Image (cartoon, coloured by chain):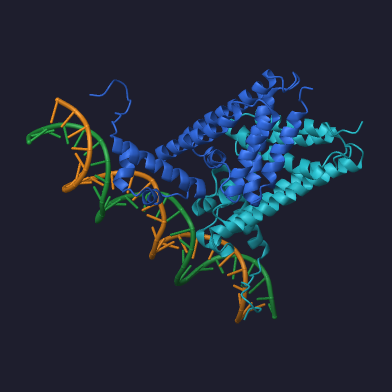
Chain colours: A cyan, B blue, C green, D orange
Amino acid sequence: MNNSLNIPKKQKLTKKGQETRSRIIVAAAELMYEQGVARTTIEDVQNKAKISASQMYHYFKEKKELVLEVISYQTSRVIGTHTRYLSNLDSFEALYAWRDFIVNIQIKRNCEGGCPLGSLASELVEINSDAQQEIMSSFFEWEDSIKKGLRYMLNHGELNSDADPDKLALALLAALQGGLLLTQVRRDPTPIIVALDTMIEHIISFKKV
Amino acid sequence: MNNSLNIPKKQKLTKKGQETRSRIIVAAAELMYEQGVARTTIEDVQNKAKISASQMYHYFKEKKELVLEVISYQTSRVIGTHTRYLSNLDSFEALYAWRDFIVNIQIKRNCEGGCPLGSLASELVEINSDAQQEIMSSFFEWEDSIKKGLRYMLNHGELNSDADPDKLALALLAALQGGLLLTQVRRDPTPIIVALDTMIEHIISFKKV
DNA sequence: TAGATTTTGGAGTGTATATTCCAAAAAAAC
DNA sequence: GTTTTTTTGGAATATACACTCCAAAATCTA
């Protein structure tokens, strides 16, 4: 039999299997980003990923499991790209480069879609506690990445010791999320720009002279 | 016949009819706030409002129409209570009273649910353009209410002329939305507190001496 | 009070959608 | 090369859910 306890037998996936599996996740992620989790049917995902129902349920026990994989996929995408900007925050220019990166994404996509993690969060927190846990971790990780960036600035003499990088990081993440939501609702980059710029201005007030 | 054009005949509602209709809207609003629009079935609403299917469709053409009414109901609730705090912003204490009001709601509800408008926004913007329009107006109205409050502070000599109340209002609304989302995800009031306090601190930097 | 209109009950309908099942093809293991 | 395991096709199932329908009760109107 299997190894003890109720750990489900982990089938091994072949190269082909791995590839099919991730194709499903990517397709699901895109659809769920565009139209939400509830509105994305398994059939939608099948069509987009060019697979059959049996493949769907061969790789995922149920829709919920797929959703968790989508969360983890989006998490690594978002954290990955952001961390590239945040890990070397050696100047205010670098901070503004991060800002520009965020703003430009929104402009490129006509302010549609909002934040890939934020939208999942809002849709799932209250109705899927596994998802809530995952998303909470994702946001902690994201917050951490910003914290590290600001601490870096502090340690490199860009910010004076009045600055509390932990609080500023959380406030920055909140401004980012709220700015993205408003930008999405209004189809206008102004809110994300103003939200981030205002926060950054505030951070600048801690600039070391 | 009816008055010209394609304006649908507006049936007149009796007192009882009015009451039933609003009972439906309130029930739907609560359910949709707790579990989202997609997850709230017409049957859920029927049960909560103690009505039959025929009543549902007597008062609303379809679910979408009910959703629009829910948006408008939540808008007046939110804007109403907030405006009470914002219309007389004659001091920073008053600003903090608004902050406390928001934070206390979250604490009272164990940080569940998030913002009644923000959650509708996130779920509906991309899939229901009528809803998107409505919600966009709601947020403009909300933003306006904050603007007026900050302008009031400016006009009453609390803020100096460097302060841009319009930008600050938008940034504040963004911080509020993002803070509520993070608080909801984490089930912890810290994010909304830090987000608002940081923004208010920034506003304080424009305090007239 | 009679007639018209509104409100309500509740069963019925049709479709969308998650999930299952059987068996075959493909690939891996030995 | 044979056996075992993984991957795939596609039809079938079962249920949840938005919406319809008809007739009766309640309430207005004149």
Vertical placement of residue D6 versus B178, above or below: below
Q: Residue A137 appears in which quarter of the rendering? A: bottom right
Side of B49 where D30 appears, left or right: left
Q: Is residue A54 visible?
A: yes
Asked whether residue A30 appears in the rendered view, the answer is no
Vertical position of residue B79 compared to residue A37: above or below: above
Q: Residue at x 32, y 22 (%)?
A: B5
In the foreground, B151 or A28: B151
Q: How many marks?
A: 0
x and y percentages locating residue B12 in the rendered image: 28, 31
For the point 67% across and 52% down, the residue is A136
Q: Residue at x 70, y 32 (%)?
A: A195
As drawn, is B140 to the left or to the right of D29?
right
Residue A154 place in picture, x, y as percent: 88, 41
Rendering coords of residue A122 (x, y %): 59, 46
Figure quadrant of residue B88: top right
Quadrant (top left/top right/bottom left/bottom right) for the C terminus of chain B: top right
In the rendered view of the protein, which quadrant contains the N terminus of chain B? top left
Residue at 42% across, 50% down? B41
